[in-house]
Amino acid sequence: RWMAKNKSRFIYSFWFIIISFSQYANASDENPFSIKERKDIYSITRELVNHEEVGRSNSGKKVDKVIEWTKLSKYQLRPYCGATVQYCIEKAGYKIPKDVKNPLRARDWFTQDVIYYKGHYKGLYKEKPRLSDIVGFNFYGSEITHMGFFLWEIDESYSRTFEGNTSKPSNPNIEGFFDKKRLKRITIIRKLRL
């Protein structure tokens, strides 16, 4: 008698649970930005990687190219990590998301579409970061002060990233564009949705 009375509720609940689990399982297959587009951006990072500044001056052939592209004056004391992200996306032929008020300021990128926050996946579907997602770094306090691109996961504690205006892994006295091994617990990752 109870089953007959609550049959429609039971069926609705059953299907809701099945659909929820199905969406969760397929979350890693959802990709609002195609593999081709992610690879296009990645290929631009490969054109920059391992180019160094001249004497820690925020200058150099590739640095000047990025700064000129983004209209960030090289005489400003602002870092060019955000300019690097903007340059790679636009040079690959895509537009910066409209919600990013100032692409040259790292924290402005992380107002929406955050899928990972300092060691924890966010949201119902727990999406994993993918090649060319935007990564921010929280080195001190709660402020995001640096950014780059997520490349891939190394292990449970570390990810590989690409960054501009960062120190060379083998020599911290040299700055430029480098791939880095970064602790996940200091990273905030925004899904690439342009």
Image (tube, rainbow, N blue to C red):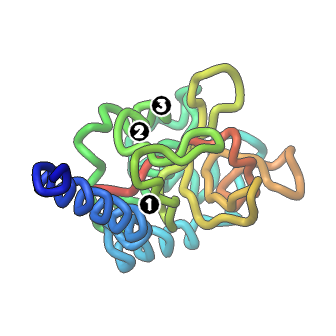
Ranked by sequence position, the earlier of labels 1 and 3 is 1
Q: Residue sitting at 27 percent across and 64 percent down?
A: 19
Report if the CB atoms under discs 3 and 2 are less than 8 Å apart: yes
Asked whether 124 or 89 is in front, the reply is 124
Determine whether 41 is above or below 58 in the image.
Answer: below
Q: What residue type is labelled 1?
A: Cys
- Residue tagged 2: 109
Asked whether 110 or 73 is in front, the reply is 110
Report if the CB atoms under discs 2 and 1 are less than 8 Å apart: no
Task: For marks 2 and 1, give the CA distance.
Answer: 15 Å
- For disc 2, the neighbor class at 10 Å (few under 14, some 14 to 19, many from 20) is many
Residue 166 in sight here: yes
Task: For marks 1 and 3, give the CA distance.
Answer: 18 Å
Q: Residue sitting at 30 percent across and 32 percent down?
A: 101
From the top left corner, tell me how far across and down residue 34 is, in percent. Answer: 32, 74
Residue 88: mark in rendering: 1
Displayed quadrant of residue 185: top right
- Residue tagged 3: 107
- The quadrant in which the C terminus is found is bottom left
For residue 133, side relative to residue 158 (left or right):
left
